[in-house]
């Protein structure tokens, strides 16, 4: 198979002809080319079309070689120009730029699309570094974003300090498992034990059996639910009646997080009325009845009603709800539901609608906007992750034999993240605007008052386990999801009650 003659090959051929020219000319009468240096000089001035005339061939064969040099000048010049064009139009220049900026933070995205564009813009507000995308799915590219048509491996090998490398697998694809598969194909060779040398963020709804340290999974449904309950928490003084209409991906995450994090008062009795196909949710969360009242109101605990009927027929429930959450995955249906409610019902509570833009109406709150979802705080969750890790370190200091963060199972890490995510509710319960004020108020409480807050934290911990299908057993068995502490707070040993204080003591972590 023939190969194209490269730059080195061309120069080698020219030098060979130059040497032949020297041999032919050096013995001729009246020769001006008497050394190899003369022949080399003649070749250079001929190829560059300068032609000083100080040296020249006098033999017939030498003149033939001179003609070849003249003709070769056009080809060589074209080759040089083409090579330079290829260099500047290829990835060679960007790769060289990466090498020269290896000490910077690198944020490497699998794709430049509408969602990663929002995330990059938000990161730029607070972070310095290089923003690199390996594909482009948009017609435009923001300033300061480098589009590099290379694989993750090619970029990773250019980064000396891997701790400053952030890989974000977030392709806009119908099957987000492709993002996880791309992560696996890219990072499996870099995995050392249970930890990656760089940080990876993967947009997927899939939860694998093993998640190494420095890998963080996210999806828009989970983010939307977290953001909603952060922005619209339950009333800490009055029990609410909450209606959820739509049990697709969004509805399931909203309900799951409502049940795990909405712990605002001892003895609360919140009612959740769920409309939509709940069969799969109930099948997956088969332990809910161990803690919550299902399809029956209970004055001493939260109740969840899974309605088989259409919400349109439940007039009294709709009209007396304190909030109605319209969260079908099809946003056009949510808009139709809103129109129907406005047209046919007199509601006393707020209406919260999952919709891609703000709806400027009284008592209507839009959530799930892309600008709110694709932010550094919600996707990378660096502050939340750091807080959870610090809480666990404080816990491990006071409990001999406690595993390190990297040794925790994914469930245990999520449990710690749930503690950190509940901190906003703790601020509200203490009536504080910031962490310094909250910790100062907590420190002034009596032992009995603190014990009530510890009890509340135990309630939250129990909920998290119950929703994830853990059950009580006399002997703890994590592999079977059995725990000996899934008991009322009053029945816990004294040393176990104290452990529920760590979540409140950790308020000082946020002050540092």
Image: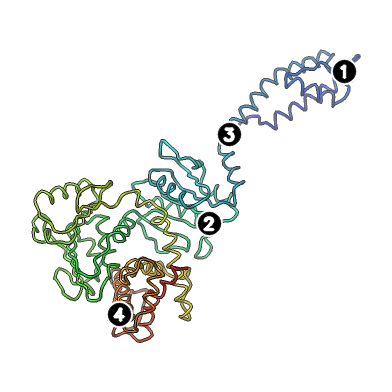
Who comes first in sequence, dot 1 or dot 2?
Answer: 1
Instruction: Point out the frontmost of discs 1 and 2.
Output: 1
Instruction: Point out the frontmost of discs 3 and 1.
Output: 3
Give the label on residue 88, or none. Answer: 3
Who comes first in sequence, dot 2 or dot 3?
Answer: 3
Q: Are marks 1 and 4 in contact (CB under 8 Å)?
A: no
Q: Which residue is mark 1?
A: 32
Q: Is residue 10 above or below residue 437?
A: above
The local secondary structure at tag 1 comes to: loop
Who comes first in sequence, dot 1 or dot 4?
Answer: 1
Q: Which colour style is shown? A: rainbow
**Cα distance, mark 2 to mark 4?**
49 Å
Left or right: 132 in relation to 307: right
Please report the residue visible at 39 percent of the width from the left and 73 percent of the height from the top. Answer: 439
Instruction: Point out the frontmost of discs 2 and 3.
Output: 3
Q: Which residue is mark 2?
A: 189
């Amino acid at each position: 198979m023939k190969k194209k003659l490269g730059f080195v090959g061309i120069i080698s051929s020219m030098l060979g002809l130059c040497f032949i020219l020297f041999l032919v000319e050096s013995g001729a009468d009246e020769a001006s080319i008497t050394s190899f240096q003369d022949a080399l000089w003649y070749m250079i001035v001929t190829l560059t079309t300068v032609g000083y005339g100080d040296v020249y061939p006098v033999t017939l064969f030498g003149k033939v070689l001179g003609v070849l040099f003249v003709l070769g000048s056009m080809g060589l010049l074209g080759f040089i120009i083409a090579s330079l064009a290829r260099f500047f139009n290829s990835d060679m220049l960007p790769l060289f730029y990466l090498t020269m900026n290896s000490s910077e933070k690198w944020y490497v995205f699998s794709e430049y699309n509408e969602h990663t564009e929002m995330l990059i813009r938000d990161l730029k507000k607070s972070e310095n570094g290089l923003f690199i995308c390996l594909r482009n799915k948009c017609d435009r590219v923001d300033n300061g974003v480098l589009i590099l048509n290379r694989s993750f491996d090619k970029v990773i090998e250019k980064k000396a300090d891997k701790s400053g490398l952030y890989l974000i697998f977030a392709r806009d694809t119908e099957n987000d498992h492709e993002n996880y598969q791309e992560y696996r194909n890219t990072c499996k060779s870099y995995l050392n034990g249970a930890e990656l040398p760089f940080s990876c963020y993967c947009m997927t709804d899939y939860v694998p059996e093993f998640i190494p340290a420095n890998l963080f999974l996210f999806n828009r449904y989970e983010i939307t639910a977290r953001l909603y309950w952060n922005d619209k928490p339950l009333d800490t003084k009055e029990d609410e009646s909450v209606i959820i209409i739509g049990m697709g991906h969004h509805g399931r995450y909203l309900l799951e997080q409502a049940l795990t994090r909405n712990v605002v008062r001892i003895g609360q009795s919140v009612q959740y009325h769920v409309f939509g196909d709940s069969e799969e949710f109930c099948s997956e969360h088969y332990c809910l009845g161990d803690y919550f009242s299902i399809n029956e109101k209970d004055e001493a605990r939260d109740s969840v009603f899974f309605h088989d009927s259409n919400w349109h027929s439940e007039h009294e429930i709709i009209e007396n709800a304190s909030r109605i959450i319209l969260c079908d995955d099809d946003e056009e249906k949510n808009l139709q539901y809103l129109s129907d409610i406005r047209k046919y019902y007199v509601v006393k509570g707020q209406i919260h609608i999952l919709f891609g833009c703000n709806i400027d109406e009284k008592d209507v709150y839009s959530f799930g906007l892309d600008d709110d979802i694709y932010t550094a705080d919600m996707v990378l969750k660096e502050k939340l992750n750091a807080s959870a890790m610090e809480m666990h370190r404080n816990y491990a200091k006071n409990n001999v034999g406690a595993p390190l963060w990297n040794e925790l199972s994914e469930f245990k890490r999520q449990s710690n993240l749930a503690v950190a995510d509940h901190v906003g509710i703790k601020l509200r319960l203490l009536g504080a605007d910031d962490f310094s004020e909250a910790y100062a108020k907590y420190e002034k409480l009596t032992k009995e008052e603190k014990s009530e807050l510890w009890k509340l934290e135990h309630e939250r911990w129990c909920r998290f386990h119950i929703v994830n299908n853990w059950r009580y057993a006399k002997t703890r068995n994590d592999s079977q999801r059995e725990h000996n502490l899934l008991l009322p707070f009053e029945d816990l040993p004294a040393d176990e009650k104290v452990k529920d204080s760590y979540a409140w003591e950790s308020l000082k972590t946020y002050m540092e």
